[in-house]
Image (cartoon, rainbow, N blue to C red):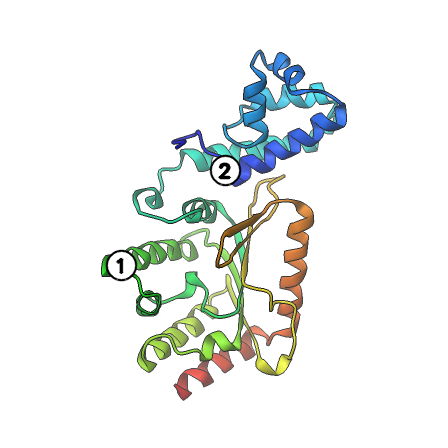
Amino acid sequence: MPTDNRVSTVLARRLGGELLRLRDAAGLTQPQAAQVLSATAAKVAKMERGWVPFRDPDIVALCKLYGETDESAVAGLLALAKLDRERRKAKGWWQQMHLVGNLGEYIAMEQVATRIRTWQLALVPGLLQTPEYIRALGVTSNWSHPDEIEVLVTSRVKRQARLWGEQPLEFHAVVWEAALRQQIGSPEVMRGQLNHLAEMARLPHVHVQVLPFRAGGHHGASGSFNIVSFAEQGALDVAYAETAAAKVWVEGSEGNEAFSRAFARVSRLSLSPHDSVNLIDSISKGM
């Protein structure tokens, strides 16, 4: 199992895919690319698949070989490589916890993101959940040991720290009304969760909208998803969705645009942030 830097990351795969596109457009082979790097074709293959961190001189040399003369495009690739190296070197708290599947990679990206948009069909967004709500979710999931629930609570609460500090994460959540009316835990747990959601929605960098039942059919019925954005030039958005069978990353610009359009549509159908808070308060009082 690869460790340390020898892992394939989302950002490196995006960068490697762009270099592969440039190489194909130039009509060159991996051995030819390897020659300019004084490396092996195997190394070029690993780079294009995102298995190794990228050195700036290698990126510059490959862009020159491939005929990429757009300085802004090259600068974007260098910025993306820098972001990936920083993510790989980060000694985040999530590395010390037992996390399933790609969740560790997602959290690492979340830590360096500047904005997240999330569409949720069935649950309150994780970054806005209370510990009691999280525990109730763990119980309903029939996890085998209470310690597993506490790991989830601890990790999620730590993630919520991104919403505070000098440069807080910009967070825009659109939540279907069903997620607010579905009782998770006791009525007291749910009231506490809704009150916390309304309180967080009043922060200037947290935007919460509710898609009401009366909106009718909508474009978000296929499932929940997150769109993660970064400040660095060339770091395109990454869409993340979980299904019953797998965790899905969408890294290409065309796929990301589809998620962005879907998010914009459900956002337009939703209540304004002010009216959303009023509805949340109303549901809480009725619990």
Of mark 1 and mark 2, the one earlier in the sequence is 2
Kindly identify which residue carries mark 2.
9
| Residue at (66, 29) in percent of width and height | 20
Above or below 177: residue 84? above
Number of on-image labels: 2
138, above or below 233, in the image: below
* Residue depicted at x 60% and y 32%: 16
Label 2 element class = loop
Specify the amino acid type for callout 2: Thr
Is 138 on the left or on the right of 54, as rendered? left
Q: Looking at the rendering, which quadrant does residue 138 occupy? A: bottom left
37 up-or-down from 138: above or below: above
Q: Amino acid at mark 1?
A: Glu
Q: For the C terminus, which image quadrant?
A: bottom left
How busy is the neighbourhood of tag 2: few (under 14 within 10 Å), some, or many (20 plus)? many
Secondary element at image label 1: helix
> In the drawing, does residue 225 fall left or right of residue 253?
left
Q: Which mark is residue 211?
A: none
Q: Cα distance, mark 1 to mark 2?
A: 27 Å
Between residues 31 and 167, which one lies in front from this camera angle?
A: 31
Residue 164, image x and y in percent?
Answer: 40, 56
Residue 198 point in image, percent of width and height:
44, 74
Which quadrant: the N terminus? top left
Image mark for residue 150 = 1
Residue sitting at 46 percent across and 49 percent down? 110
Residue 124 vs 158, above or below: the answer is below
Residue 226, given in percent of the width and then of the height, sits at 54, 57
Report if the CB atoms under discs 1 and 2 are less than 8 Å apart: no
The image shows residue 29 at horizontal and vertical percentages of 69, 20
- Decide which of 197, 99 is in the foreground and name it: 99
